[in-house]
Image: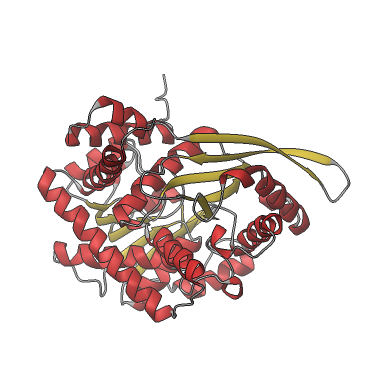
């Protein structure tokens, strides 16, 4: 009988249970942390370009507000489910806590295939969805952001729709907006840049050198592409890259900028000159100094974890490694920078954007980069110190730190009434 694939929500709940055990949390608080405060499912009807009416399912899950307003992206994807969105909202809570920014976690999504929708249809879908969640979002309540297959344009539509109802411009209702609509400098590559700051700190602790370190990146979207570009600029040797269709490998090194140009023309990194085509599975098992899974959830499992051949694994994606796989990697001595630390640069710069909007300020790119590096270095240090304190690995340390900070807030706030 084949092994049942563990869901993202089951993974998230297991992580809370483990952290609660290490923290010796009372059962009631543990149960609060495992359940979202609010889950909203809405039917989103729109009229298609051909005149037909289609109804899509929209979701917004608000997990915790113990440390501040809810914060989390909105994704458009055919596989969006309430379970998945709930897990992602929980991870956002811990991510914000680890990064030590004053937010709680949320996530949203619409079950659709955006590649089959026109720009006009996407705009109508976004504006309709926004009106249906209007009462539960707001600058001090819930601040959405882009996620899978949503972008700055999507956020502009949400901002405008919300502002139309309020009667005045409210840029701070969302982050990840276009720069000319009070978006933040440095937001586009923030997740990847934060990831590279963490990698830099990890190599110092491991006695590794970044220059000439071999790197394999699974996923060539915004995070994977920018991480590869930044690390290439720092002297790393990118030897493998992949997207949803497959990957490429060249032990002599690959220029990610030229691969990005190739992908724009062909819609895939595959068949890039001088490289061998490989599968995503083969990329993960490539021998390298640094492995960055920056694609989707559950890519490294107990089935392939034993074949991972890297010294440092930095999770650019959310939940790319299952709990069973994490144990195997730890036993192999692979140092892991877990997702809630490694990819928290995005939400950190989102926080910077929110602060700028609230004060009607605009910071320079250099100022944003400086502030981001400060936050990421401190977050890495906090998790590393927790790892030593609890005598565990970096993943358990990060969740213990994040869960602990949220639990402390809940204890101090108390229950009302």
**Residue 255 visible from this viewpoint:** yes
**Residue 146 visible from this viewpoint:** no
Q: Which residue is at a point 64% across and 65% down the rendered structure image? A: 169
Residue 128 placed where, x, y %?
A: 72, 47
Residue 378 placed where, x, y %?
A: 23, 63
Between 168 and 11, the one lying in front of the other is: 168
Q: Which residue is at a point 25% across and 71% down the rendered structure image? A: 210
- Please indicate whether residue 137 sits to the left or right of residue 415 in the image: right
- Please indicate whether residue 389 sits to the left or right of residue 289 in the image: left
Question: Where, by quadrant of the figure, is residue 163 drawn?
Answer: bottom right
Relative to 415, residue 358 above or below: below
Relative to 225, residue 52 above or below: above
Between 121 and 263, the one lying in front of the other is: 121
In the rendered image, the quadrant that contains the C terminus is top left
In the rendered image, the quadrant that contains the N terminus is top left
Relative to 359, residue 61 above or below: above
Question: Where, by quadrant of the figure, is residue 314 drawn?
Answer: bottom left
């Amino acid at each position: 009988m084949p092994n049942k694939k563990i869901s993202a929500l089951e993974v998230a709940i297991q992580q809370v249970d483990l952290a609660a055990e290490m923290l010796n949390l009372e059962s009631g608080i543990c149960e609060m942390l495992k359940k979202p405060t609010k889950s909203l499912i809405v039917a989103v009807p729109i009229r298609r370009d051909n005149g037909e009416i289609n109804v899509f399912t929209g979701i917004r899950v608000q997990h915790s507000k113990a440390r501040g307003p809810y914060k989390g992206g909105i994704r458009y994807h055919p596989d969006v489910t309430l379970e998945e969105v709930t897990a992602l909202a929980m991870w956002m809570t811990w991510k914000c806590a680890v990064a030590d920014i004053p937010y709680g976690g949320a996530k949203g999504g619409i079950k659709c295939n955006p590649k089959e929708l026109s720009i006009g249809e996407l705009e109508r879908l976004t504006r309709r969805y926004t009106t249906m969640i209007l009462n539960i979002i707001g600058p001090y309540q819930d601040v959405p952001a882009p996620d899978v297959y949503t972008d700055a344009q999507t956020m502009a539509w949400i901002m405008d729709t919300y502002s139309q109802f309020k009667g005045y411009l409210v840029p701070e209702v969302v982050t990840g907006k276009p720069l000319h609509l009070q978006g933040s400098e440095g937001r586009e590559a923030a997740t990847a840049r934060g990831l590279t700051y963490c990698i830099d700190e990890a190599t110092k602790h491991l006695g590794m050198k970044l220059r000439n370190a071999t790197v394999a990146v699974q996923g060539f979207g915004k995070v994977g592409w920018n991480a590869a570009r930044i690390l290439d600029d720092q002297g790393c040797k990118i030897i493998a890259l992949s997207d949803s269709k497959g990957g490429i490998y060249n032990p002599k090194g690959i220029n990610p900028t030229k691969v990005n140009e190739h992908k724009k023309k062909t819609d895939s990194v595959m068949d890039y000159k001088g490289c061998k085509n490989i599968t995503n599975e083969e990329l993960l098992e490539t021998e390298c100094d640094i492995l960055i899974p920056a694609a989707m959830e559950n890519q490294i499992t107990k089935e392939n974890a034993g074949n991972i051949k890297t010294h440092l694994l930095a999770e650019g994606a959310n939940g790319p490694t299952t709990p069973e796989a994490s144990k195997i990697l730890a036993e192999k001595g692979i140092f892991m920078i877990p997702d809630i630390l490694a990819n928290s640069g995005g939400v950190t710069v989102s926080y910077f954007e929110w602060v700028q909007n609230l004060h009607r300020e605009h910071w320079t790119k250099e100022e944003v980069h400086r502030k981001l590096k400060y936050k990421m270095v401190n977050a890495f240090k906090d998790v590393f110190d927790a790892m030593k304190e609890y005598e565990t690995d970096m993943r358990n340390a990060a969740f213990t730190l994040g869960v602990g900070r949220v639990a402390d807030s809940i204890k101090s706030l108390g229950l009302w009434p």
